[in-house]
Image: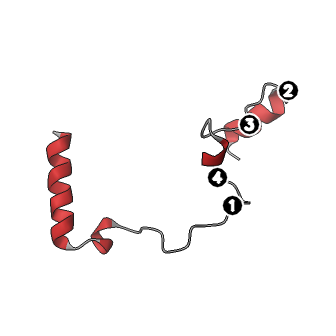
Amino acid sequence: MNRLATIAKLLLPPVFAPKAWSSPFEAANWSPRRGTVPGASPTDARNELTPGVRTELVRKSRYLHS
């Protein structure tokens, strides 16, 4: 729980303390009861993409950004 949530929990009555801190949808929040998704988590685009694919993605993202 982050610092703001801890302070709010201490100062506010339970009726006014928000229950979801990161999303209005309860299922979108992190929960220790939910398992992890199988498979490796992404590390870095330089490691996972081929040089040609990464070059095209960078080129198109720079075009869209400018």
Measured in 3D between alpha carbons, the distance from the residue under mark 3 to the one under mark 2, in whole angstroms, is: 12 Å
Are the residues at dot 3 and dot 2 in contact (C-beta closer than 8 Å)?
A: no
Q: Is residue 34 left or right of residue 56?
A: right
Residue 19 bears which disc, if any? 3
Are the residues at dot 1 and dot 3 in contact (C-beta closer than 8 Å)?
A: no
The vertical placement of 13 against 54, above or below, is above
Q: Which residue is mark 4?
A: 30
Measured in 3D between alpha carbons, the distance from the residue under mark 1 to the one under mark 3, in whole angstroms, is: 17 Å
Identified at 68% across, 36% down, the residue is 4
Mark 2, Cα crowd under 10 Å, few <14 / some 14-19 / many 20+, is: few
Measured in 3D between alpha carbons, the distance from the residue under mark 1 to the one under mark 2, in whole angstroms, is: 28 Å
Q: Amino acid at mark 2?
A: Pro
Q: Which residue is mark 1?
A: 34
* Color theme of the render: secondary structure
Q: Earlier in the sequence, mark 1 or mark 2?
A: 2
Q: Is residue 21 left or right of residue 64?
A: right
Q: Earlier in the sequence, mark 3 or mark 4?
A: 3
- Which-is-in-front pick, marks 4 and 1? 1
Query: Would you identify the image quadrant in which residue 38 lies?
Result: bottom right
Measured in 3D between alpha carbons, the distance from the residue under mark 3 to the one under mark 4, in whole angstroms, is: 12 Å
